Image (cartoon, grey):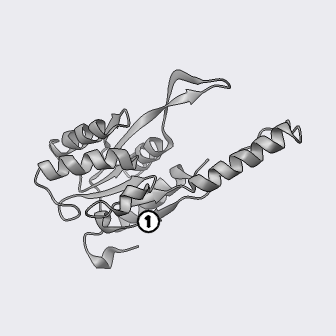
Amino acid sequence: RNNYFELTNRVLNILYQRKYTRIGFIGGYLNEMTHTHLSKKMNIDPRTKAYETWMKLHNLPINEVITNWTLDEGYSAMDKLLNSSNPPKIVLVASDVLAMGAYRSIHLHQKEIPTDIQIISYNNSEVASYLVPSLSSISAPSYQMGQAAIRLLHDRFINHRTIPYQLLLPSKFIERESSIANKKNRI
């Protein structure tokens, strides 16, 4: 798995050092996986949990919208945040797809990224560097996660490993134009 929980905390600490306290979040819940299929039980996503825990720890108001992970939901969630009584100055968005919908909402509200509102997303999909302005994103090592999963399956079925274990792969923060209000704030 990736370390989105830990990296979310790191990014929030950086934002706090930059004096941001009006931090929003757009995320969602995840379906629990059983041995055979996805269940209907929903779990809090690690990104959402990290945001909520960090905001409570710093006595800051939680300003989040939980979605169903689509472009339309990203648009609606950002619309809700921008129409709130105290809109955030920076928003963490739990996927690049949600961020694309959020970009559209920001544009239609006649706001500018990063001048009026800043965005940091997750996944670092190919589209992130092509959006205007380019999207800051937390990148998980997807290819390496796939390789590790194959090695774990091989170990389990070929070597008959019976002890379960997890492998945590590091993510990294790739800061681009969407979260840089001015050049001196670069990480």
On the image, the x and y values in percent for residue 61 come to 30, 45
Left or right: residue 66 versus residue 76 is right
Q: Is residue 148 above or below residue 180?
A: above
The answer, for residue 177, to whether it is visible in the render is yes
Q: Amino acid at mark 1?
A: Ile
The residue shown at (30%, 68%) is: 177
Classify mark 1: helix, strand or loop. Answer: strand
Total label count?
1
Quadrant where the image shows the C terminus: bottom left
The residue shown at (36%, 74%) is: 186
State the residue position of label 1: 174
On the image, the x and y values in percent for residue 82 come to 18, 46
* Residue 20: quarter of image: bottom left
The residue shown at (69%, 45%) is: 149
Binning the other alpha carbons within 10 Å of mark 1 as few (below 14), some (14 to 19) or many (20 upward) gives some
Residue farthest to the right, as pictured: 159
The answer, for residue 12, to whether it is visible in the render is no
